[in-house]
Amino acid sequence: MNMKLLGALAAIALLGACASGDQDSAASGAGSAATTAGPRPGSQEDLVANVGDRVFFDTDRSNIRADQRTTLERQAAWLGRFPQVQVAVEGHADERGTREYNLALGQRRANSARDVLVAGGVAPARISTISYGKDRPAALGSTEEAWQQNRRAVTVVR
C-alpha cells in the first residue's frame, strides 16, 4: 500500500513539474517577444538600427562627403529627440601612413562630423571627439575595400 501511495505522489510531483515548466516556457517566450520588439530608444542599438552610426571619407580627406552628410543630419535629428544622450565621435583612418599622421587625420574627421552635428542643433557640450587613427580597424586587410571601411567617423552613445 505504501508503494502505491509513493508511486502516486511521485506521478503527481512529475506532472506538477511538467506543468510549471510549460508555464516557465510560456513566460520566457513572452519575455523574448518583448525583447525582440526593437532596441531601447536612445541606445546605441537604436542609433545603429534607425539612423546609422558612421560616415566614410575619401583617402587623406577629412571633409564630409555629400553622400555622407544625410547620415549626420539624421544623427542630429535623432539626438534632438533624446536630449539626455551624450555621444563621442571617433575618428579613424586606414592603415596607410604613419601613426602620427593617422591620429591627426582621425581627429580632423571626428571634428568634421561633430561640426555637422552642432550645425544640426546638437549642443557642443554633448559631443566629445577622439581619434584612434589606424589602431582600431573595422575591416582587416590591405585592400581598397578594407581601407574604405576604415576611413570613417563613428558616433557612439556614452
Image: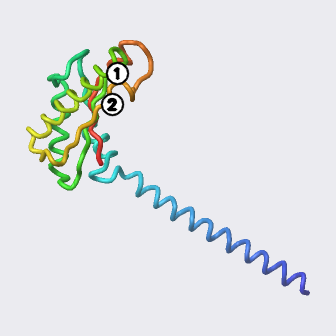
Contact, CB < 8 Å: mark 1 with mark 2? no
Q: Is residue 134 left or right of residue 69?
A: right
Q: In which quarter of the view is residue 104 placed?
A: top left
Image height of 79 relative to 28, above or below: above
The picture places residue 92, in percent across and down from the top left corner, at 30, 27
Residue receiving disc 2? 132
Image height of 17 relative to 35, above or below: below
Q: In which quarter of the view is residue 106 placed?
A: top left
The picture places residue 21, in percent across and down from the top left corner, at 62, 66
Residue type at tag 1: Arg
Residue closest to the eye, 29 or 78: 78
The picture places residue 55, in percent across and down from the top left corner, at 25, 29
Image height of 22 relative to 35, above or below: below
Q: Distance from label 1 to label 2 (Cα)?
A: 9 Å
Crowding at dot 1, Cα within 10 Å, few <14 / some 14-19 / many 20+, comes out as: some
Crowding at dot 2, Cα within 10 Å, few <14 / some 14-19 / many 20+, comes out as: many
Q: Residue at image x 25%, y 45%? A: 87
**Residue occupying the far top of the picture:** 143
Res 99 label: 1
Q: Residue at image x 53%, y 63%? A: 26
Image height of 143 relative to 44, above or below: above
SS under mark 2: strand
Q: Earlier in the sequence, mark 1 or mark 2?
A: 1
The picture places residue 85, in percent across and down from the top left corner, at 23, 52
Number of callouts: 2
Residue type at tag 2: Tyr
**Residue occupying the far front of the picture:** 100
Q: Residue at image x 33%, y 30%? A: 132
Q: Residue at image x 23%, y 49%? A: 86
Please state which of the two labelled residues, at mark 1 or mark 2, is closer to the viewer. Answer: 1
Q: Quadrant of the N terminus?
A: bottom right
